[in-house]
Image: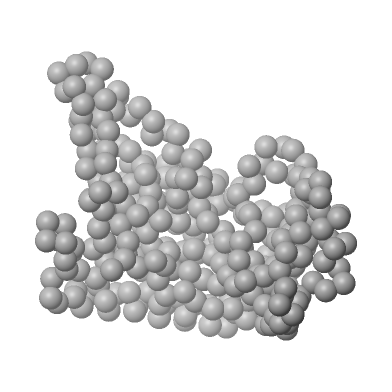
Amino acid sequence: HHPIGVATVAPFSMLSLLSASLALAGTVGRDGRLEQPPPSVGRELRELKDNPYVCEEGVETAKEEWKVFGTNLGGWLVLEPWITPSLFYQFLSVDRKFGKEAPAHTGMDTYTFCAALGPKEGNKQLRRHWASWVREEDVRAIAQSGATVVRIPVGDWMYVPYEPYIGCTDGSLEELERALALLRKYGLRALLDVHAMQGSQNGFDNSGQALRVKWTQVSAQDPEAVTTFEHWPQRAADWLAPYDNAKGAYPPEMNKTAYDRSLDVIRKLAERHRGDATVWGVEPVNEPWQ
């Protein structure tokens, strides 16, 4: 499975999709197989060749230099189990070893990954993941697809460190700089996306920490008791204030300290990358909830 697929930041033509398929052809995936173009790609390219950027109703789309076409480096600097499940297989069946203590030894996002493994082991595994998840051949394939911009999710802890990320995510900024250098080499630009804020801006694992995870041990009297968890029905976001699940509301006043801290994250991000023309833009926060 190749982790870097083709997605869009703005509408794009079928020709772009097809050229992306051709660009990936010949690339060796992580399963060792050689990527192949779709069987129909030649015919479809011929059909679009004469008029690739005109809509069916005859309205011309934006000029080529204004198009934003690219992909997202998901699951890299901010972990998401559905994207990188192999990093989380190690936490399967921890309840058999730790029983009721299983929650403290289970990783399901970047926060709990670091908390469960500790800074030394967590950092060792993350450094290995960072190096293998984004390779030069991947960036080259993205450029060959005709992409112009790559969205890179980053965590707020990279700019304003706090526990349990301290130590565990050491080297993440250097990895980001490595990626920016590769984008620069292949004529691409980056959209830096603050994907995770302290306290979670949406309650999901993609915010760095899934909140309101409810753990339950089934058949507690049984030696083979199974510890499970529930999340979606009661998830919440405490980014700018603690959410009251019972009332289904936030308090009247927002947490000014958290608000100021978020602005500080953006400020430090801007200060660090302001001289890098590769950085095309900044997404201040990803998918804030309510």
Horizontal and vertical percent position of residue 60: 73, 82
Kindly identify the residue that appears in the image at 47 percent across and 81 percent down.
271
Quadrant placement of the N terminus: top right
Q: How many marks can you see?
A: 0
Q: Is 145 situated left or right of 214 in this image? A: right
Q: Is 60 situated left or right of 179 in this image? A: right
Tell me: residue 12, above or below residue 4. Answer: below
Quadrant placement of the C terminus: bottom left
Q: How is the image coloured?
A: one colour
Is residue 178 shown to the viewer in this render?
no
Q: Residue furthest top?
A: 223
Tell me the quarter of the picture where residue 158 sits: bottom left
Tell me: residue 218, above or below residue 209. Answer: above
Kindly identify the residue that appears in the image at 72 percent across and 61 percent down.
17
Tell me the quarter of the picture where residue 43 sits: bottom right
Kindly identify the residue that appears in the image at 17 percent across and 68 percent down.
250
Q: Is 173 situated left or right of 122 in this image? A: right
Kindly identify the residue that appears in the image at 16 percent across and 61 percent down.
248
Tell me the quarter of the picture where residue 15 sits: bottom right
Q: Residue furthest front?
A: 57
Horizontal and vertical percent position of residue 180: 62, 68
Tell me: residue 288, above or below residue 117. Answer: below
Horizontal and vertical percent position of residue 67: 67, 77
Is residue 216 shown to the viewer in this render?
yes
Tell me: residue 46, above or below residue 218. Answer: below
Name the residue nearer the viewer: 247 or 244. 247
Name the residue nearer the viewer: 93 or 288. 288
Horizontal and vertical percent position of residue 201: 32, 64
